[in-house]
Amino acid sequence: MLNFISRSYKTQFQPLTASFLLYKKITEQYRNPGILKKIHSILPDQIIFQTNKQDQLVSVLKWFKNDFMNWAPKDVMCKRCINAHRSGSQMIPMEVEVLLGSSWKVRSFEIYNCSTCKYRYAFPRYAEVLKVAETRTGRCTEWSMLFGAILNSLGIETRLVHDFLDHCWNEAKLDGKWFHVDSTLVLPFSLNHPSYYEENWEKKYKYVLAFTADKIEDVTQTYTLQWDTVQQRRLKDNDKNILNFTKIYSCLK
Ligand SMILES: [Zn+2]
């Protein structure tokens, strides 16, 4: 995969290359006509036939969050115990074990186990958009990867954005300009509210990067009202690795 990167370079950048490769593989699917056709077929007619792109974006944000996707919480209570009306001390969150997947297609498996009734189930973290469209379940990664595919299937060019802290979302291009879009948030915050995370979640960014299949872009300035502080943070940590991101990205296969 990284044939022309030396061994030491590869080791040094391993965590970064793994996430870069994932975002490259996801956004490559945004250019696959067969995948986009299938994604398009799940959309309701009233969204497909909207002619104003901005209105269409608002409609699809509402439909996706309210009617289509399910959130996968990290703390899960056992459904079987709830159905059996167990309560009090018997109701403790299920234990979770994370197993790494063997390729970008299945990033990991979260195995949930109930210590009370021994019920077990697996939550696979897929990175194939058609798989996510089938399971309709996930967290911000699954939501943003599928939402990006949906917008691209509607002819709205869309990319993935990751803050390298704990969240990812999308950007959609309208009238030649990229706009912040986050299908996990509610309107109006889900559209064009780039400073939402810093103002509400106290984000302390160093790098916010946007991904298309062939390009990676540093979009940190879009998301911060504290650009000087972000720059000082970068200098202080002397984090040179990520500065090579365009070089790394172009080498990934
Ligand atoms: Zn149980």
Image (spheres, rainbow, N blue to C red):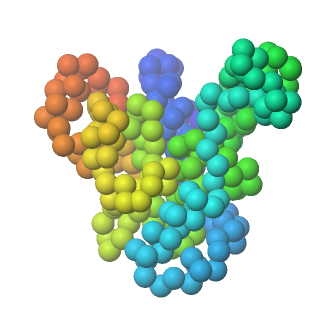
Q: Quadrant of the N terminus?
A: top right
| Image quadrant where residue 233 sits | top left
- In this picture, is 35 found above or below 210? below
Residue 115 percent location from the top left of the image: 79, 15
| 117 with respect to 156 (left or right) | right
Instruction: Residue 181: tell me if it is visible.
Output: no
On the image, which quarter does residue 117 sit in? top right
Q: Residue at x 31, y 54 (%)?
A: 193
Tally of numbered discs: 0
Horizontal arrangement in the rendering, residue 232 relative to residue 193 (left or right): left
Q: Is residue 137 shown left or right of residue 6?
A: right
Q: Residue furthest left?
A: 228
Q: Is residue 192 visible?
A: yes
Q: Nearer the viewer, residue 249 or 180?
A: 180
Q: Which one is in front, 146 or 193?
A: 193
Q: Residue at x 74, y 54 (%)?
A: 134
Q: Residue at x 38, y 38 (%)?
A: 163
Q: Position of residue 209 (x, y in %)?
A: 37, 43
Residue 89 is situated, as x and y percent measured from the top left of the image, at: 72, 14
| Residue positioned 41% across, 56% down in the render | 190
Is 147 drawn above or below residue 74 in the view shown?
A: below
Q: Which quadrant, please, contains the C terminus?
A: top right
Image position of 39 with respect to 29: above or below: below
Please tell me whether residue 196 is drawn above or below residue 176 in the rendered image.
above
Q: Quadrant of residue 48?
A: bottom right
Viewer-nearest residue: 238 or 53 = 53
Q: Position of residue 77 (x, y in %)?
A: 71, 29
Please name whichever residue, 248 or 219, is drawn nearer the observer in this view of the structure.
219
